[in-house]
Image (cartoon, coloured by chain):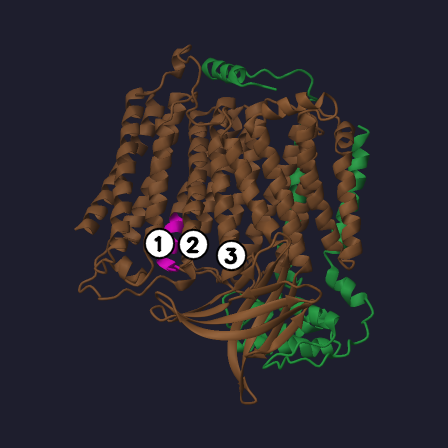
Chain colours: A green, B brown
Amino acid sequence: MMGQPVLRTLGAGLLAGLLVAATPLAAQQAATPPAPVPQQPSQDQLVREQALPDQTAESRAMTLAREIRCVVCENEPVANSSAEIAVDMRNAIREKVAAGATDDEVRAYFASRYGEFVLLRPRLSTATLLLWGAPFLLVLIGGAALLLRARQRPAPEAEAADPDLDAAARAALARAEAARTEV
Amino acid sequence: MIAEFGHFALLLALTASLVQAFGGLLAGHRMNPRLAGLAGSAADIALIGCLVAFAALMSAYIRSDFSVANVAQNSHTLKPMIYKIAGTWGNHEGSMVLWCLVSALFAWMLARTPGTLRWSLKARAVGVQGLVGAATLAYLIFASNPFARLDPAPLQGADLNPLLQDPALAAHPPFLYLGYVGSSVVFSLAVAALLEGRVDAAWARWVRPWALASWMFLTVGIGLGSYWAYYELGWGGWWFWDPVENASFMPWLLGAALLHSAIVTEKRGALASWTILLAILTFSLALLGTFLVRSGVLTSVHAFALDPERGMWILLILAVFTGGALALYAWRGPSLGSDKGLFAPVSREGALVINNLFLTVATATVLVGTLYPLAGEAIFKQALSVGPPYFNLTFTPLMAIVLVVLPIAPFLAWKRADLMGAMQRLWVAGALAAAACALAIAFAGGKALAAVGFGLGVWLVCGAIAEVADRVKVGQVPAAQSLRRLGTMPRSAWGMALAHMGVGIFTLGAVAETQLRIEHTASVPLGGTTTFAGYTARLENLTSIDGPNYYADRGTVVVTRAGSDEVVTLYPERRFYPAARMPTTEVGLRHELLGDLYVALGDPAEIDGAMQWTLRLYYNPLVSFIFGGVLIMAIGGLVSLTDRRLRIGAPQPARKTAGTAAEPA
């Protein structure tokens, strides 16, 4: 099989790409913060919320706001809630981000204040080990089961006849197959 | 009187379903075709009973008969007629009546369509379907009676939840239920095969149209729900990984796995016991979803009908059917002895096994993520939340693997395939995908996820086109002959190509929307402007309007774009429904193929003595691809369903060659 290495390389490349892609936050953090954009005098007069002047910081704050749960709502991140406390929490995130806190520090701040419950991205701990491990574990178990099965079987040589297929069903299948205008 | 008649009809349907279950199962056990005939007649009566009950409830809604408690709690005389009709299933009790009606209809179709299925297998399936119907009818009658009376009857009803008064959401539950109940038919066929002790190609051929129809209805139902969330909730999102959304998504995912494994079972006689297991689990997930939605064990943003006691009932039904079927599977599964078709790892079967492995793990991941908060609470005494970031980090890579393999699979031969040859025939698609990747990196500001996603989307769309081109031998034979081949291509091939292309289009839309969305929030006074992403939005006007059963503030927002003459006027609303005492938002939305302009009007506040309104503005790129992709997937399913081979009851040439194929009366 010449093709297998090709596909494997392709797959590995894509996987690596995905892994890199899965950590856009880390990438953003690593980038040097751009110079603050001078604020345009605009007619906006924000009531309770003022977006951060630095675009990168604001989008980081909003990404964080999407993974911190509003404490009075039904399963909504603070980014999506118009509740008063959600606005306060959004502002608190902006404050922390502007003060130079890392994403983890912001998360830790909210977790210590409101409990792990507010983190929509649960932190890795003994309680969440199974949660984060489940997908990998399941792929491993599934893959191992498939490999074992493949080993147990003989290589496919002859077309396996199916003696269990009863005559009527087989005849009907043959008819249906014949009736079908195959290209 | 009509309500009592409906109640009676439900009892009749319950009795008939029990007879159907008894007749069908005993017919298979005793090999008695007359009992199978009895089960068929009972299915007729159960269907009539459910139809009458459904019509009776609908008539109570149309007449606004508030002496029926269910109508009083969920309707209102001022509600527009379409929502009075849709209100029939816009609440827990009514939706369960709809479920029972669909279940009875499908049982009747199963019993009454002629086909190649062994009569005893069919009788058993009809019997199991009768059991499912009886369980839901009993739950309906004894735990959520839709016809309970109120005395004295109130003069006015409490109104339907205003969020649900919407065309997309009026159609959403029927489609979901067609999907859920469709999976119950597949379940019944699987249990019948286990009882019969045989699984063969004819069985798989019967399973496929039901699995396909169920999956297609679920696709439409989920798509409608998602579309509704997009324009109704006012946050620009279309998928929140909320437990209620996951509840419908899990049977969809596993249903997709089932569709593919059933193909292997039908064509190659392999994976038979796996297909059976998937059939059992898909319906179990549909039941589990109903339990999660109805019981309120998980907090959800879409929780509309909660009742812990009812949750116990559903849990009981779930335990009996899933537990029973799995026990039967453990007992009978190993002796089915029908995994005959052998195949090399690199083959169409092998690709479909990969599809099944990752779709199943993805489903399990969604299940783990959805239920983990319960486990965290119970085992670790810690309140946890599992939200979108978890699913984005786990589910998305798993699905990405499925999507990478997807276009290759149709190019692989059954049994043993030449991967290199397949890749050679796909090189154009691969090159275009790589180009899309590069373009995305250049234009999307170095967002790696966006680049990979766009590459994947293009790979899928081009892969589907390449498959069709390869099938009609474009470039290998004269164009006229290719065209002729296109005309005679089987519908199932068209369906597959369309559905796979739909997945690709959806991927493009989903990646663009999540990665490149622009959002902007601002507070502006009347006549004030705010700018974002090259757009300038001005709050021109605010008017008060009176709807039929609500009043609203309607904003006029004029959006212009720098360097363009185009002026877009949007009318976002804040509505208030006095009967339900609930505010809702209606977004101002301009759909375009390449992106949506989306404005939601927020709360007013007084600042420095002047009133200001919060405007939430979004530019959502390629949203039409998300919902268009879902629609194309569903159309693919429909086209495939009309394939001659799959049509239930399609005319079969000369039957009766073998005595065993005789139909029960």
Q: Which residue is mark 1?
A: B82
Between B277 and A183, the one lying in front of the other is A183
Between A12 and B436, the one lying in front of the other is B436
Residue drawn at x 75%, y 43% is B433
Identify the chain of the residue marked 2, using the numbered disc in the image: B
**Image x and y of residue B361, in percent:** 61, 45
Type of amino acid at the residue the image marks with label 1: Ile
Q: Is residue B569 left or right of residue A41?
A: left
At label 3, counting other C-alpha atoms closer than 10 Å, the crowd grade (few under 14, some 14-19, many 20 or more) is many
At label 1, counting other C-alpha atoms closer than 10 Å, the crowd grade (few under 14, some 14-19, many 20 or more) is few
For residue A9, what is the image quadrant?
top right
Residue drawn at x 37%, y 16% is B662
Spatial distance from mark 1 to mark 2, Cα to Cα?
Answer: 8 Å
Spatial distance from mark 3 to mark 2, Cα to Cα?
Answer: 23 Å
Q: Which mark is residue B243?
A: 3
For residue B105, what is the image quadrant?
top left
Q: Which residue is mark 2?
A: B167
**Element type where label 2 sits in the image:** helix
Q: Do discs 3 and 2 share a chain?
A: yes
